[in-house]
Image (spheres, rainbow, N blue to C red):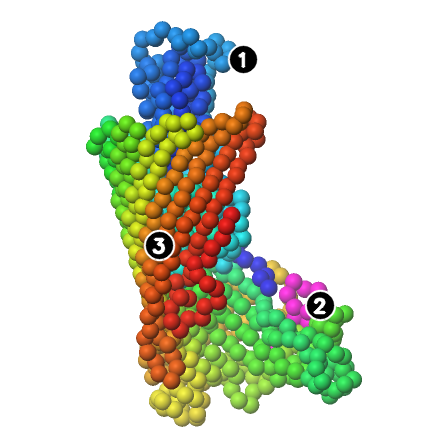
Amino acid sequence: MNVKNGLRLTVAAMAVFACVQPAFAQNRRFDIPAQPATTGIQALGTATGLQIVAAAEDVRGLRIAPVRGEMSAREAVRRALEGSGLSVVSDDGRTLVIKRVAARPTAALDDRPAFGAAEDEIIVTGIRRSLDQSLAVRRNASGIVDAVVAEDIGKLPDQNVIETLQRIPGVQIARVQGEGNAFVIRGISQNQIQFNGAMLGGPTSDGTGRLGEFNPEILAGMQVIKSPSADTTEGALGGTVNLVTKKPLDQDRFVAAGRIQGSYYDRAERLGYQASAMISAKTADDRLGLLLGFTRHDYIRSTHSFDSAGWTLLNAGTANQFDTNNDGVANSADQRNVYRPLRMTNNLLWLDHVRNGYNGAVQFRPAPGLEFSFDAAITDTMVRLDALRLTAILSNAAKDVTLGEEGTVVGATYTSPTLRSGNFQETYDTRQEIYSLAARFERGPWLVEARGTRSTGWRESFQGVPLLIPLAGLSTSATTDFAAGNDVPTFLLAQNYDPMDPRNWRLESNYETIDIIDTTSDEAKLDVTWQAGWNWIKRIKVGARYQDTKLSSLRRAQNPSAAAIIAAYPQADGNRDGVLSATELAGVSFSGLPGSHFLNGTSSDTVYDWLAGPTDFAATRAGLGLSYPEITLSTVRDTHQKQMAGYAMLDLDGAIGRLDVKGDAGLRYVHIDRTSGGYVIGAETYYQTYNSKFDYVLPSLNLRTMLTPKLQARLSLARVIANPTLTSVAPGARRQLRWPVERRL
């Protein structure tokens, strides 16, 4: 039961030099026909998501050029105004101001003021609010796509990208220690993550990136694709999350921006902060741009909690184990089917979290229609969690028992619980890197896009505790009361010794595990689009993709008892009394609980302090004569997976009766070649490899139409697959499902 998380209070925000947040800086598909500027500017603003301002007298009588194909929002504006006599005279990153710069040509016959427009009207188009920008992305996508744009991300106090995802309908997140840790899309956890359209590999059991390790400040936007088309990379049942980073050619000529925010955590009595900085510059001709960014999140949190670890059913069979009528004997006179708490645990969690992010981008346009770009992002995360824990494992020896209406033991004094105290320490060191090189060439009706990406991930997690119990001969009783009406159940200890004196405690065991996962993923993609312009078929798109993923994981572990340690290394028992007292442990500092007293601000009657303190496990290990934990062979997993895919897709645009129908239809072929290896433990221990091959044909169809100016209908059908947890397909691992999993939408 979580009692209270530390209060986050924003206390500072400063150092903003020149912050520019463009409207969703990402290539998108446009299909705007040539038309009078009075209506074309409005269509252009809606399609780009930009705020466009123009005087009615400047645009009247002029026409914009057609804009078709995939490009950035500002490139679409440039093409639309080419040869129109209009030009962008101001661009502050959010709003474009357009004015007439050439002699006024002869007015077109169909160029009339919009219905109800005044002669001196100022045309203001585009979507200023970020919510409307997100709606524009949804409205114009062929399939079911949701988006969050940079303006949203900058305004919200999200600690990582997962928390940004919760703004999107159909996405739910889970939090650990107050921070977003995992997400599901439409209740499904088998999803995939992309970085500017490229697959993001990382140190997880399925080889994908750890989304929670990315700071949101690096993003220009985020898409969640819930219904795939043929050109969508395979591998997700719920949806695909695409992280779109900031680009230099979408910024002003020079941008320097910085931000710092402080948050005070009252439980930890510490001040944390989030800081970010970005520098972007481009040449006057918009041909070359460079962007560099840095983010850092640094905070310390403390959480106080109580846990009973569930309840056990007693007196259910022929034997009676628990005395409910307080006559000192468990027999048939006692109530049947009663539930006793398993244990009483007080937890004080102390979390120290540091996450650094580095990102950069280079864009180069050497000639019209030709662009090269390079994007990179690196995250480094260091987390240490100290769980200072006092646990009383309850037994059936009890007196003064009080039962609730449903047979629940709401109060009792347990005369012989097993008492344990320990600093359960966890550390997580994670590094992710992604580098992506892309080229884009457009000439006439042809568009060719190519991208090569390498992403790597490494994560080492440690868990350990020198578990302490009282010396033999010392007695403890525990009194509990769940019906006292307090915020936290009563949990009191009666002891015939000083529980804060380490001389009264001894080592039970020294537990350590180290999990390591290492992933490398290489991807190459090629997409070719031809503007057909036929009836119903506007574009034909074909492409191919190749991905090579390598994942290795293992665990090191040891959990020797105190008796085993003394037998192997007698020097650990300095006074030769046959036990390892807490005072004989090297690297352990016993100081009690840090910060304000336990459960401050709650109504409770419980243990407020116990023997606890930080542990240096390397020193403790050396003092006990223990080596570094050995590799557990049964946990070794090696997987090498190659995925090859090709597709063909038609972009549709036609009419059925009075309905204008748009969408896409396509077919995707996927071949998967997977080799997995691991140790088989039995009468003989040996390394075994398996090879599996899979072939899939994945059809898809997405259609949309406007039933009314404010009501849109969509139809999406697709066959999709998801890759398994790659650590579960190696020999020696238990398989519970047949992989890949398939689902039809």
User: Where's residue 497, x and y in %?
Assistant: 56, 84
Does the rendering let one see residue 141? no
Classify mark 2: residues with Cα within 10 Å, few (<14), some (14-19) or many (20+).
some
Residue 68 sits inside the magenta stretch: no
Nearest to viewer (mark 2 / mark 1)? 1
- N-terminal of the two: label 2 or label 1? 1
Which residue is nearer to you in this view: 670 or 247? 670
Identity of the residue drawn at 40% across and 60% down: 206
- N-terminal of the two: label 3 or label 1? 1
Q: Which residue is mark 1?
A: 116
Vertically, is 378 above or below 561? above
Compute the Cα span from label 3 to label 1: 58 Å
Compute the Cα span from label 2 to label 1: 71 Å
Classify mark 1: residues with Cα within 10 Å, few (<14), some (14-19) or many (20+).
few
Give the extent of the magenta segment: 481-493
- N-terminal of the two: label 2 or label 3? 2
Classify mark 3: residues with Cα within 10 Å, few (<14), some (14-19) or many (20+).
some
Tag shown at residue 484 = 2
Tag shown at residue 728 = none
Secondary structure that dominates the magenta span: loop
Q: Which residue is mark 3?
A: 671
Q: Helix, strand or loop at disc 3?
A: strand
Nearest to viewer (mark 2 / mark 3)? 3
